[in-house]
Image (cartoon, rainbow, N blue to C red):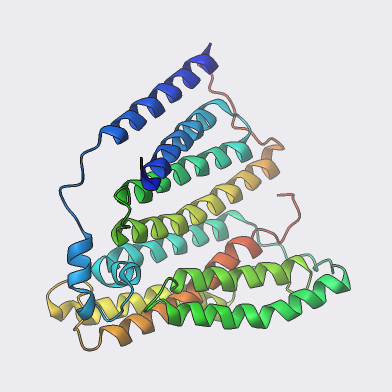
Amino acid sequence: MTGGLLFALTGAALFALGVAGVLLIAHLLRRILAFNLMGSGAFLVLVGLAQRNDVPDPVPQAMVLTGIVVAVAATALALALTRKLHGLTGQIALPEDADD
Amino acid sequence: MRRFLVIAFAAAFAAALGSAMLELAPSPLDLRIPVAAHLAQSGVSHPVTAVLLNYRGYDTLLEIAVLLLALLGILAVVGKDNPSPPRPAHPVLQTLARLATPSIIVMAVYLLWAGAFRPGGAFQAGALLAAAAVLLHLVGLLPAWSMPRLRLRLGFVIGFVVFLMVSTALLGQGALLKYPAETAGMLILLIESALTLSLALILAGLFLLLSRDQGGA
């Protein structure tokens, strides 16, 4: 097993952890963190699989670089919305659906 | 019950994905060869920068658009109240931040310049500059930003606008963002400089616009 493959496997595990977190955690701040974990897992899979033969490929690396910046922007927007929700309702969790 | 189901599903998904990766055949398409083959015409000598700004320039163009969109979203969400005055930190921290800032700026310019031939580039330089702004804000030397005026707005959009203008001017080449080989290096440096400025201001804005009211609505 090469180092790149190990990165990719770790990325798959991180992604699954993030999915479970997004689905199970009600606290919005921790849910945003779990969502970021999903993103980091996907990035790790992309770079890891691309260098599983030990020679890195610049195309996935550049795409991950783009993805990281977009993830930062999305996180900031999510945090702003969370703070607005907290300011309006005093809660930091989404209201449960009526039919849930 | 729901908890158990979700965890079992996530574990099964990770296991399936992992075993698929272990069985994965070598990629039939090796992009390293075409990237290396056209590097001489790309205007830069580092393959990641060449991919970011030349081969897949539209990714970067749309990325700065997404950043701008996120910033507009934040501007729409946060209120119009004036920022509270910054709380000054310990003088030692303030002095250290003052000392660190010039070297951070030098480092950012170096990263921008180095992006042409080694790891570096507009994103790293912009992130570094934004970190300097956040550092100065945290020690109380830089107040939080309120609703941006014209100058700051121009700074936010200049990266996107310059990138868009260059790509529009080059449409005559027959494809989006197809640089002529002899001026590619210059054009990429121009775009990257504008991108660095915009990225630094946008990333700093994401933090400084949100930190202006301490908590409340």
Outermost residue on the front side: it is A1
Q: In this view, does B31 lie to the left or right of B12?
A: left
Q: Is residue B188 left or right of residue A73?
A: left
Can the viewer see residue B114 in this picture? yes
Residue appearing at x 62%, y 56% in the figure: B78
- In the rendered view, tell whether residue B82 sits above or below residue A14: below
Observer-nearest residue: B94 or A4?
A4
- In the rendered view, tell whether residue B20 sits above or below residue A1: above
- In the rendered view, tell whether residue B125 sits above or below residue A35: below
Residue appearing at x 66%, y 36% in the figure: A92
Observer-nearest residue: B112 or B78?
B112
Outermost residue on the top side: it is B1
The quarter holding residue B42 reads: bottom left
- In the rendered view, tell whether residue B77 sits above or below residue A5: below
Can the viewer see residue B150 in this picture? no
Image spot of residue A68 (x, y percent): 45, 56
Image spot of residue B195 (x, y percent): 43, 75
Q: Is residue B112 left or right of residue B27?
A: right
